[in-house]
Amino acid sequence: AGAAAEYQARPGEVPSAAAVPAAGNDEPALHLYRDTNAWCPFCERVWLALEHKGLPYETDYIDLQNKPEWYKELVPTALVPAVRFSADGELVWESMAILEQLDERFPGTPPLMPADGTEARERVERFVALGCAEGDASVAGVGYKLLTGGGFGSSGTSDEELAALREELDQAVETAEEFMGAGLVAGDGKLSLADVLIAPAMERLEANLKTFRGYDLREKLGPWFDAMAREPAYQRVKGDAETHNTVVRQLFGIGKDGALPAPRVDLASPQGCAEASLRLSTNLEAVVGDAIKNSGVDKRHKESIEEHFLALAEHLQAAAARGESPAASRPPSPFPRPTIAQIKAMDKDALEAAKAAAAEKRAAGAAALAFLRNRVSAPRDMTADGAVALRAGCDAMIASLY
């Protein structure tokens, strides 16, 4: 099974850490080419399957906005994902083709397709045949039309058209409920190709539709979401609601002109706190550099940013040790107001200068923490649990500064 507790630096990326993909010291069975931000749902399909099968693999991260020439020459479509198998060097692209090859090439691993002649196999095949896995009539297909008002880049949709799309989505959900209303699609409690195909879109739409359209997919499909949340492989690759909502809001402009929607509240776990602390402290230099470059905080405040980020890492580690959420306590500021004893020891001018200097450092730290809070992206930078914990820690730190 893929490693979930070890991390390695990813040069040139900010934040620059990624889960070590290979299991132990095994030779990689394949090389995966995927997007740098972990936003591509088709890449997530393959990633989830690899983690489920426990295959050792290596990864190259492709910048989709600036694809290297070597990748364009390697893959005819220039799209991600793609996989090169170690045994014979064969290159395969398109997520469905890769998933089929994984079952064919590695028969000793947990299969994506149930055995022939079983009820589970019949359910998966019927789910795909009915267009529930992908296509215009699937939950994903109709869900994205409702989310975007007809499609990404559409010029606008009337209330009547949105109402019609809601009815269309109701029908798609009703069709899917036969397979997803009691848990995983195959009905035997095991992850299958059907679940792998729909998981990336479903996790995004579960967050996006509830936030931006008030449509709750969990109302009828909750058992499927709950069953997926218990899958160890899925826990390693899934994103969190706030990441998905931020991507939609910032990249596609959905809801951008109105009041920002309130994010769904997820409770931070001790494991998430420990991971977030490790990621932040391990990659401190790169994360501070990213904040200086992109947050608007002047580089002369580098020390303040470093101190606040270190304090955040310590607060997260302490929360993990106590087994509580980082929101349960308020960490002290690295640059507190002068104490009564210090006030008594200073003349008026020195006191005012000290207060102003500390306030300026706290302001820089607060701005950098706010930037980091919204900058973190799961699973690009850390797992969903880690991102939830990091955001909770940032909120606690900011609240403690003033």
Image (cartoon, rainbow, N blue to C red):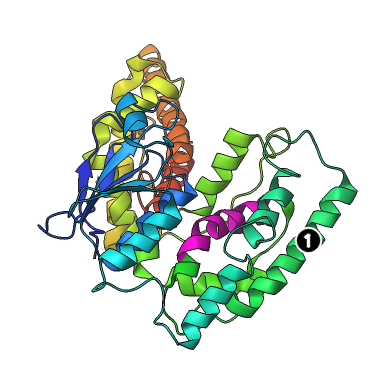
Q: Residue furthest top?
A: 349
Instruction: Examine the structure image and report whether residue 155 is included in the region drawn in magenta.
Output: no
| Residue that carries the numbered disc 1 in the rendered image | 168
Measured from the top left, where is residue 173 in percent x and y? Answer: 69, 68
Would residue 204 be counted in the magenta stretch? yes
Whole-percent x, y for residue 194 in the image: 50, 68
Magenta-colored segment: predominant secondary structure: helix
Mark 1 secondary-structure assignment: helix
Q: Amino acid at mark 1?
A: Glu
Q: Estimate the x, y position of residue 314 in percent, counting from the top left.
A: 27, 46
From this view, report whether residue 383 is shown above or below residue 127.
above
Q: Residue at left 31%, top 74%?
A: 110
User: Residue at the spot x=62%, y=72% of the render?
Assistant: 221
Q: Is residue 249 left or right of residue 18?
A: right
Left or right side of 78 for 342: left
Q: Give the left or right position of residue 240, taking residue 22 as reference.
A: right
The segment highlighted magenta reads 196-211
Front position in the image: 49 or 307:
49
Residue, far right: 160
Task: Pick whichever, 89 or 163, lies toward us.
Answer: 89
> Is residue 304 at least partly visible in the picture?
no
Residue 87, by quadrant, is bottom left
Number of numbered discs visible in the structure rendering? 1
Q: Position of residue 336 (x, y in %)?
A: 36, 33
Look at 12% across and 55% down and name the residue there.
27
